[in-house]
Amino acid sequence: MAAPGEDRDWQRLDLWLWCARVARTRSACAKLIEAGAVRINRQPTQKAHARLRPGDVLTLALGSADRGVVKIWRVVGLGDRRGPAPEARLLYEDLSAEE
């Protein structure tokens, strides 16, 4: 990912969503982004390569139009790998439950 010696404080949006287990494949995460279902800090984005940093707030519109679910997550960490679900939950703080 990062070049040797390069300190990256960001991660591609599609890769982070895949590590956070939002969808099964990275291409499915990219399609979700391109469909306009993801906002970063309230700003709509349709770019899978958008830079995501810890502290950013994601708004995710998941599900179908008639049974849609909106999730609001604060990015807590960047993913090194796609691990099990308990590990993936450590990447974000769910703000949806607070509202």
Image (cartoon, rainbow, N blue to C red):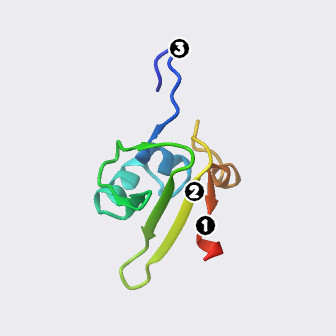
Front position in the image: 52 or 24: 52
Amino acid found under the numbered disc labelled 2: Arg
Residue 96's x, y, as percent? 58, 71
Q: Which residue is at 29% across, 62% downward?
A: 35
Return the residue at label 2: 74
94 sits left or right of 23 in the view: right
Residue 83's x, y, as percent? 63, 45
Q: Residue furthest right?
A: 86
Residue 25's x, y, as percent? 44, 50
Asked if the residue at tag 3 contacts the one at tag 1, i.e. Cβ–Cβ closer than 8 Å, the answer is no
Label 3: which secondary element: loop
- At label 3, counting other C-alpha atoms closer than 10 Å, the crowd grade (few under 14, some 14-19, many 20 or more) is few
Amino acid found under the numbered disc labelled 1: Leu
Disc with the residue nearer the chain's start (2 vs 1): 2
Above or below, 54 relative to 69: above
Amino acid found under the numbered disc labelled 3: Gly
The label on residue 95 is 1
Disc with the residue nearer the chain's start (1 vs 3): 3
Return the residue at label 3: 5
Q: Quadrant of residue 33?
A: bottom left
